[in-house]
Image (tube, rainbow, N blue to C red):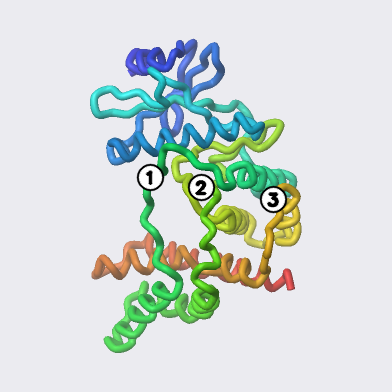
Amino acid sequence: MDSFIQNVAHAFGLKCRSMSRARFGHLCNTSRGLVLIQRLPKSQAGAMQEENILFQHEVKEYLFDSGFGETDRFFLAGGRPYHKVGEDIFIAAAAFDVRGADFTNREDFLAIVAELAKMHRILEDVKFSAKPQRRMQAAAPDKACEVLAGYRKKLMKAGKFSEFDMLFLKAFEKFEPKMAAWAGFPKDILGNNKYICHNLLKEENIYMGDRPIFTNFGMAGHGHYLHDLVYIVKRYLKIQPQGDLPLGDILKAYETHHPMQDFDIDFFAAMLSYPDKFVKLTNDYYSKKRSFAPKTYLARMEECLTRGQALEDYLRNEG
């Protein structure tokens, strides 16, 4: 395998001085720095994935040319940011020998939020020739609320409840007002999709050098910047359930580099409170008409309840 990866590296104009296995590929020490070489899963191969890699490449190069700083920029093979061997697609991206992000660290997290704001400002209203891969769109909040209410009605009519059903009914009672509140806002309130969002700002995709380094743009696409902001705040509360960092401080860090025009705190709170994980988990479970609930589903529903309460307490403390 090492000789094969060496050949792949050569296609990108790289020579591996040393090599080690990484979680998602092979880390190569080269004269051009540390490089991660990955073979994409078969499920991600094909023309749509190639187009998505081209889109990521354009985004990262535009950020670099605009002075944003480092990202996991792709190396080129024959002028393309990927290399094909048969039906397999390989990518080679810059890797970083620095510490990962720590969302429990106040300075880290605020620096990451500020860097996210810079990214949104730079990528506002920019057109790229390649297109991101289309993702399955989540149901609109009003439709999601209607579907889940239908599940509840069917369960109550049957009168027989599994362990998962009981957890769902408990969670539905808690989350239904949150779904209704978000559904009550005008449908076009997030109609401005002129930004590029990262959509996957987890700790493992961020490194802390002289400034935060964003990696893994595989889910990047068009959207409203608030989607990224809501995502990262929820990730913060997952790691830090007690929410030691006030929301006001987080928003202040963001607005330092990207003012949130016509910002409505009630709207943002409703968007933040919308139980997207609960909606997705419930639909996934009941749409498959399972006769029993795997323990993972029970654990995930319990987690939805725990995280929902933590978020509610966090927003309540904000006043």
Asked if residue 102 can be seen in this view, the reply is no
Of marks 3 and 2, the one in the foreground: 3
Asked if residue 1 can be seen in this view, the reply is yes
* Residue 101 higher or lower than 293, as above or below: above
Residue 152: image location, x then y, percent = 36, 81
* Residue 28 higher or lower than 129, as above or below: above
Front residue of 279/131: it is 131
Upstream in sequence: badge 3 or badge 2:
2
- Which amino acid type corresponds to the residue marked 3 in the rendered image? His
- Helix, strand or loop at label 3? It is loop
Of marks 2 and 1, the one in the foreground: 1
Residue 166: image location, x then y, percent = 39, 78
- Helix, strand or loop at label 1? It is loop
- Which amino acid type corresponds to the residue marked 2 in the rendered image? Leu
- Say which residue label 1 marks: 133
Mark seen at residue 199: none
Front residue of 149/138: it is 138
- Say which residue label 3 marks: 258
- Which amino acid type corresponds to the residue marked 1 in the rendered image? Gln
- At label 1, counting other C-alpha atoms closer than 10 Å, the crowd grade (few under 14, some 14-19, many 20 or more) is some
**Quadrant of the frame with the C terminus:** bottom right
Residue 314: image location, x then y, percent = 67, 67
Residue at image location 54% in from the left, 27% down from the top = 95
* Residue 112 higher or lower than 183, as above or below: above
Q: CA distance from mark 2 to mark 1?
A: 14 Å
Mark seen at residue 200: 2
- Helix, strand or loop at label 2? It is loop
Residue at image location 56% in from the left, 67% down from the top = 271
